[in-house]
């Protein structure tokens, strides 16, 4: 489950048409494998930045890279965009509650910052 800072649950995937089109390039088995990979990425820590996580995962996980390239119809330029869409969708579908905000490119890598409910926003002091 994904929530904004204002407490609104996010249920609509931005650029859903792009996501759906990419899904048509994957078999059901591949779609399931991609879901499992993203679930494991999310569960690996209590907070994530999408730009940092994407750079690391696409460098370290050859299976994910190949699957996203296939989902992108072979277009290497779209792999990063699809990573962000698949990650956002995985947070929407995740069983735990996560909160997110857009990250500033001036102060960091950009993208979105996500953190598990019950933890403070990354970069803030403990309450």
Image (tube, rainbow, N blue to C red):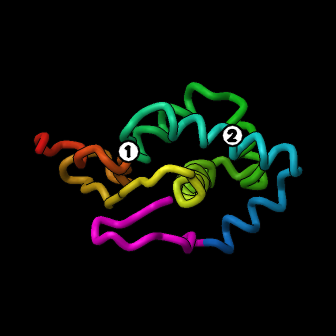
Residue 59, numbered circle: none
Residue drawn at (55%, 29%) of the image: 59
Query: Does the magenta portion include 2?
Result: yes
Q: Position of residue 3 (x, y in %)?
A: 40, 64
Residue drawn at (76%, 67%) of the image: 21
Q: For the residues marked 1 and 2, what is the alpha-carbon distance in whole angstroms?
A: 19 Å
- Image quadrant of residue 15? bottom right
Residue drawn at (42%, 45%) of the image: 51
Q: Disc 1 or disc 2, which is closer to the eye?
A: 2
> Counting other residues with Cα less than 10 Å from the Cα at mark 1, is it few (<14), some (14-19), or many (20 or more)?
many
Looking at marks 1 and 2 on the same chain, the residue that comes earlier in the sequence is marked by 2
User: Which structural element holds mark 2?
Assistant: helix
Relative to 23, is 44 on the left or the right?
left
Relative to 72, is 90 on the left or the right?
left
> Counting other residues with Cα less than 10 Å from the Cα at mark 2, is it few (<14), some (14-19), or many (20 or more)?
few
Residues shaded magenta:
1-15
- In depth, the one of 81 and 49 nearer the eye is 49
The tally of labels here is: 2
Residue drawn at (35%, 50%) of the image: 117
Q: Position of residue 6 (x, y in %)?
A: 28, 71
Residue 49, numbered circle: 1
Disc 2 target residue: 36
Q: Main secondary structure of the magenta part?
A: loop
User: Which structural element holds mark 1?
Assistant: strand
- In depth, the one of 7 and 18 nearer the eye is 7
Quadrant of the frame with the C terminus: top left
- Image quadrant of residue 122? top left
Q: Position of residue 93 (x, y in %)?
A: 60, 57
Label pair 1/2, CB-CB below 8 angstroms: no
Query: Does the magenta portion include 43?
Result: no
Q: Position of residue 89 (x, y in %)?
A: 58, 59
């Amino acid at each position: 489950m994904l929530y904004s800072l204002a407490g609104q649950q996010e249920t609509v995937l931005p650029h859903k048409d792009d996501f759906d089109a990419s899904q048509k390039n994957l078999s059901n088995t591949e779609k399931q494998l991609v879901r499992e990979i993203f679930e494991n990425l999310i569960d690996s820590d209590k907070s994530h930045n999408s730009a940092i996580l994407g750079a690391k995962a696409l460098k370290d996980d050859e299976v994910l890279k190949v699957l996203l390239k296939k989902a992108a119809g072979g277009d290497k330029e779209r792999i990063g965009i699809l990573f962000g869409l698949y990650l956002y969708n995985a947070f929407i579908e995740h069983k735990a509650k996560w909160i997110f905000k857009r990250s500033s490119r001036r102060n960091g890598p950009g993208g979105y910052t996500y953190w598990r409910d019950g933890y403070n926003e990354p970069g803030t002091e403990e309450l």
